[in-house]
Image (cartoon, grey):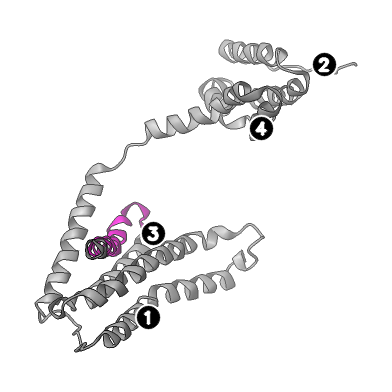
Amino acid sequence: MRFARVEIPHTSLQTCERLTEWTEQISRAPKPFFWGNLQYLLKMVLLAEGAGTAMEENAEAMTLHARPRASVDFGAQTGGAALAAKLYDSSFQQRRVSLISHQPPLKKMTVTLVLSGWLVGMVVKASLSKSSWVPWTTPALPDMTARMIYSARCLAVCTMPLLAGVIFCTYKRIMTPALDPLAGHEHYVQVHRRYLGNTVEQYILVGVNLVPMAATLSDQYLPVIPAVVALFLLGRILFWVTYVYQRSNRGFGYMLSMYPSMAMFMYNMYMCL
């Protein structure tokens, strides 16, 4: 079989050493695997053309990103787990580098947890003491039927963020090319879809825990129910706004609805004991 001559452009010494090393590695691979990696090598050579020192700086990044996933699957079929693990090491290194370089905002997380917890406690306390600045009142709930009906109405109010999200997402689809979901324009509604998914999760947590809690609360603690609803609505609004305009600060709104769900869950678990 005859091959056309491939002219490799002049690059730095480091780049040539890398290409030589890759050539030696793929020459020792099984024949079908050799041809797949030869194509990969030629792509790397084309990327190096005219790149100069940029190839040196980005060689490691291109090595991590350019190897296709199919090579890993093929290695598992032909060379066993050892070869597949060796091929998969590049993506593993990529994830490990991402984890090492990522610095969690511990200070911001601590402030968010403390402030949201303080606000949740203040709202619940004001609701229990029937403070004048609380805009809701708890009706008389003499029996279990009245409590269940009241809980169902509160859960119906909690669907307001979901309804608003669905309406706005529909509006965005109509007014943008995202009207066709398969046309590749989902970025217009991606944030709002994520908001809707998170709101559904939070709503399930609230609904599953609110009803059993309302059935076992004493009369003096029933004002907690509208407080939970108010925190859920406020938290969802803040979460949506910050998700759209300032994603790194969305944790405050998230915790406003998460703290009550966690508290209700722990209360229900305690009552089950």
Structural crowding at the residue carrying mark 4, measured as other residues with C-alpha within 10 Å and reported as few (<14), some (14–19) or many (≥20): some
What is the secondary structure assignment of the residue under circle 3? Answer: helix
Q: Magenta part of the protein: which range?
A: 245-267
The reply to whether residue 50 is visible in this rendering is no
- Return the disc, 1 or 4, that comes first in the chain's sequence: 4
What is the secondary structure assignment of the residue under circle 2? Answer: loop
Image x and y of residue 139, in percent? 20, 88
The residue that appears at 27% across and 88% down in the rendered structure is 146
Label 2 close to label 1 by CB (< 8 Å) = no
For disc 2, the marked residue is: 5
- Return the disc, 1 or 3, that comes first in the chain's sequence: 1
Label 1 close to label 3 by CB (< 8 Å) = no
The residue that appears at 15% across and 60% down in the rendered structure is 118
What label sits on residue 243 in the rendered view? Answer: 3
What label sits on residue 156 in the rendered view? Answer: 1
Image x and y of residue 89, in percent? 54, 25
Image x and y of residue 127, in percent? 15, 76
User: In the shown orientation, is residue 254 left or right of residue 176?
Assistant: left
Q: Amino acid at mark 3?
A: Tyr
What label sits on residue 73 in the rendered view? Answer: 4
- Return the disc, 2 or 1, that comes first in the chain's sequence: 2
Structural crowding at the residue carrying mark 1, measured as other residues with C-alpha within 10 Å and reported as few (<14), some (14–19) or many (≥20): few
Q: CA distance from mark 2 to mark 1?
A: 72 Å
* 116 inside magenta stretch: no
The residue that appears at 31% across and 68% down in the rendered structure is 209
Q: Amino acid at mark 4?
A: Asp
Residue 79, quarter of picture: top right
